[in-house]
Image: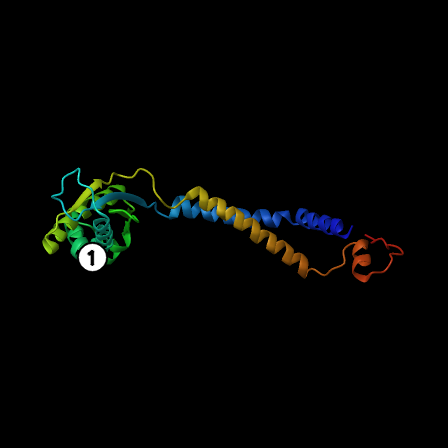
Amino acid sequence: MEETIDLREIFTILKKRMWIIAIITSVFVVVSIGLSFFILKPVYEANTTLIVNTDTDKKKDDILTGDQVIVTEKLAITYGEIIKSRTVLEPIIKDLGLNMTYDELYECVQVAPVKNTQIINISVNSKIPKQARDIANAIPTVFKGEVKRITKANGIEVIDRAITPDDPIKPKKLLNVSISAVLGVMVGLFVVFLIEYLDNKVKTPQDVEKYLELPLIGVIPLER
């Protein structure tokens, strides 16, 4: 019976202070909409894919041995570091006339060797879709030239060239608004129960019986 009473009290508290939850949730949602739709600039991502071989003179029907696969996997990891080096990125900044420093471009480029393969995925983020595409397509050209110059190897081929992205990868507007709404409700609930916890006033005859544990004899009406 006590659990039923407590549950009923909770619903009473929520009903009484629902406006607080509504206001706090609305503030969270409005701020999220303002940030996601009007303040945060969209970021686009373009991707290109490379494959690393140890011997470009191999015939198409040749099959790589296990040792060769291991070597190419290690090369893919090494090449991933070279791709983000100054030797590769600084010429791209100059050739494309980019208004950014090496460090800024470095942060925009992500290189991910695919595990147990000879493949390298290159992702470039930019607030300008065409710029993301141009950088992603310029990297393999400069990179292949530098690898050939340094190691005399020519075993890198482009599998997929980058295309101009249509949709931004962030901000995720609907997700941001949804998360903000949930956070708003949670904060609102916390505030409501905190106010109720700090409010020690006796408001009803039932409160007298509850807190003083004494039977109620009568109620004196308030004169107006």
Relative to residue 34, is residue 59 drawn left or right? left
Q: Is residue 101 visible?
A: no
Q: Type of residue at label 1? A: Ser
Image-based side of 88 in relation to 201, left or right: left
Camera-nearest residue between 221 and 69 = 69
Could you tell me if residue 87 is visible in this image? yes
Relative placement, left or right, of 142 versus 207 is left
Q: Which residue corresponds to the image point at 17% horizontal and 53% vertical from the top-left? A: 88
**Mark 1 element type:** loop
Say how the picture is coloured. Answer: rainbow
Residue 100 picture location, percent across and down: 22, 54
**How far from the left and from the top, in percent, is residue 60?**
16, 38
The residue to which callout 1 is attached is 85
Q: Residue at x 88, y 55 (%)?
A: 218
Q: Residue at x 45, y 46 (%)?
A: 176
Q: Nearer the viewer, residue 64 or 23?
A: 64
